[in-house]
Image (spheres, rainbow, N blue to C red):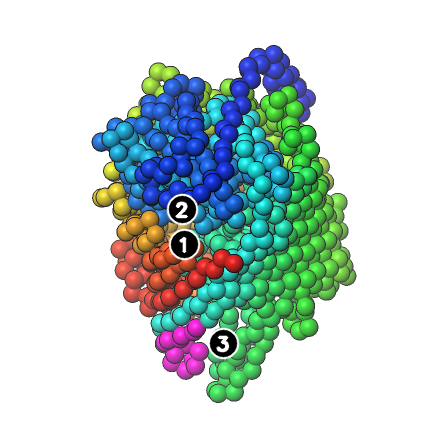
Amino acid sequence: MKSLVTALLLLISTATSLLANSIPPIETRIYDTKRINGRAPTIDGRLNDLIWNTVEWSGEFIQRNPTDGDPPTEQTKFKVLYDDEALYFAFFCHDDPELVTSMLARRDWFPGDWIEVNIDSYFDRRTAFSFTLSLSGTRGDEFVSNDGNNWDSNWDPVWQGATRINDGGWTAEMKIPLSQLRFSSEEEQTWGLQVQRRIFREEERSTWQRIPKDAAGWVSKFGHLRGILSIRPSRHIELLPYGVAKAENFEKIPGNPFLDGSASQFTGGLDGKIGVTSNLILDFTINPDFGQVEADPSEVNLSAFETFFQEKRPFFIEGNNILELPLAPAITGGSFTQDKLFYSRRIGRRPTYWPDLAVDESLDQPDYTSILGAFKLTGKTPGGLSIGFMESITAKEKAEIDNNGRRRQETVEPLTNYFVGRVQQDFRKGDTHLGAMATAVNRDIDDPHLDFMRRQAYASGLDFSHYFKKRDYRIEANILASHLRGSEEAIYDAQVSSARYFQRPDNDYVSLDPNRTALSGYSGSVRFTRTSNSKFVFETGVALRSPGFEINDLGYMRNADQINQFTWAGYYFRNPFSIFNNVGINTNQWLYWDFGGNLLLRAANANAHANFRNNYHVCGGVTRSWESTSNTALRGGPSSKWPGTWEFNFHVATDHRKKINFGFGGYTQQGDEDSEDYREGWMELIVRPTNAMRLYFNPSISRNRPEMQYVSTESFGSEDRYLFGRLDQKTTAMTFRLDYCITPNLTVQYYGAPFVSAGRYSGFKRITNSRADKYQDRFNVFDEGQIAYDSIDNVYYIDEDENATNDYAIDNPDFNFRDFNSNLVIRWEYMPGSLLYLVWSQARSEYQSFGEFDFDRDMRGLFDVHPHDIFLIKFIKWFSL
């Protein structure tokens, strides 16, 4: 431990000494715009309106990629005008018209050559609105936050753009309505401004305001747009009513009145956006529908923990970053990486209660909990206070049960209210931030069979960050608390869940109390970072979770009861040299303890990546974890020792600008003492037959062979038996995508993903001494006289003491899982902001227990499964009031 502390102090000392290498300041550029007196320019890309002659061109762009600070291959210039309705931009992108690249794609794909405007209309030096116009006419837009560290492409404002190719290159015009921006009511406005251009064939980016690649921040370094006078933000209202007609076809099950082979439904709802004040926007949705969203990727989860799935529903994605409070940085590795205080997938989740059925009963179980309505209030005041609040109510869901024509209902999910609130105050021109966040879940439980759910779940936190030394360094800290209330059953379940396992027999620092009706805990982290302005950057810190910390009612967390120390350091060559465009190397180390002071994990890794002059890319890494201790592997049993592991990964990709490009990679994890062997390989193939079509193939194959895979916990007399087996699991998967852009506003997308995984168990064993010094002394393998397979009952009977009497039994854990999900979406923006979706979704799924993997048989079997088809038409009309 002393050597670790010494190394950290030396690292910080070395980094601090680099402050002497100061970088000369870069001049802030200024553009003075003028108000339009008369007719606004026509947005056709021609630049032939006389009104453009009233303002000057600004140019002299500087290359940022690949060679920071060099002149660009081709120069760019622009003009800006405004009136009471909008901002207007004109661009002249000098180039050889025979060499420019025009590629069609759907919105927010940023294809080919493009021009981009970033506007910090708050002038808070942290947030901006980004508008990108490709030469093809494809639009892209993003909300930029956290000084350029977050770019949210799910923000979809209504604006116009047009382009033209001419003898000198290409030109473009944009009209950005002021209603799509947020700004103060001051008489004279100064906004942050950045203009950026991409030349696709060179993979080159140049900017109007130079911001070096190693600079700390993006928005805080913008140039200034001046001269905007006497504009008034309006209380803008946007309404988007929608209607959905849906038809389903599925397998007919004789005797089940709910599965008669088909179903149909018509629903409607309303989305909207209201400008409450000049700085606050209220987004709302009533009875939302997300039928156009593709399914989650398939998987076989053999762990004790819930899988984290990305949010895909538009209402919950757009602006979601303002409702985030980081629990710990991603570099901590392991269990803290994806944890978050607000995990929007909790809202509208699958019902968690399944009714018990009699032999002759059939069940109609809701797939998801209905969201009755939700709203988000977001914005930022002139004083630098960021505000984000979200409220959502989900319905009381009931399952219908049929018994030979007699029907009854059982509640499977209670009426529930979800609340998230986040505020953050800027100080010192955005260099210091102090924030707070709170979440609340309140369930109206009036059915005794739902008492296993928590009635109330609350979490809150404070966070602080401070930049210093010209934003080269940053200190961050947060502290959080959680509190649950519910029945004794609900709080008991929380205590024995996989996040904490209070029932562990060797847990001598936390007690399991079956009479509890509340549970509380805390969490926190402190981090010190060198951000940039150097080839050398680093971060180091500590994060912790108390045993009682629990946020999974509205957040996502895998483990409590941990203290994590981490350090990350990287060295970067950001400009081209030799055969490289750029090169980076980094290393990590982390340590884990539990709150009993037990060292759980020691690990370190090293990674490297390189981008070559020909735009090929290669990266790889190696991770070493030494012998570890797990409080979760026996799933409520005592802590256990596990051999160390070596992990290796690599990825190679060719030039993505080519019509055909591909990549491939691999990952392996090898356990000491031959304790595990995991290998995975994948490839990517991208083909663009035309500039309007893109085909994507991503096959993968893996083999997982752990010697110790958890099977079951059984009782033998008064003792528990923790049973494991040797697993041989083979998995193959394929993701295929077709994207065809007929026009920038009419696109066709197809997604298909077959998945097959088979696993066979052998070498069954029980844990005998989970923390023995020698690996082989920690378990006992059952011999042929102790275990026998019954093919009729599909179970293994175990006679542990070999007295010719079965002591306990386990179900055959072998599995064959086959799954296929596909989604075809035709999207037409027939008017600005108004959309028509035509959607066909198909799902096929089957589970067997013979455990043998056969690619041909399993694939044929997958497509022999009767599909569940959904066809829908969704119509959305945009009204601006």
> Above or below — where is 600 with respect to 320?
above
In the rendered structure, which disc, 1 or 2, sits on the residue that comes first in sequence?
2
Q: Do the residues labelled 2 and 3 touch (CB within 8 Å)?
A: no
Magenta stretch: includes residue 264 = yes
Residue range (magenta): 254-266
Q: Is mark 3 on a helix, strand or loop?
A: strand
Q: Give amino acid for label 3.
A: Leu
- 54 and 683: which is toward the camera: 54
Q: Earlier in the sequence, mark 3 or mark 1?
A: 3
Tag in front: 2 or 3 = 2
Query: Which residue is drawn at the image coordinates 47% and 39% (left, top)?
Result: 36
Amino acid type, mark 2: Gln
Q: Is 508 inside the magenta-drawn segment? A: no
- Label 1: few (<14), some or many (≥20) within 10 Å? some
The crowd level at tag 3 (other Cα within 10 Å; few <14, some 14-19, many 20+) is many
| Above or below 27: residue 195 | below
How far is disc 3 from disc 1 in space, using C-alphas?
44 Å
Residue at 41% x, 25% y: name it.
59
Q: Give the SS element for disc 1.
A: loop
Which image quarter is the N terminus in? top right
Left or right of 847: which side holds 390? right
The residue tagged 3 is 363
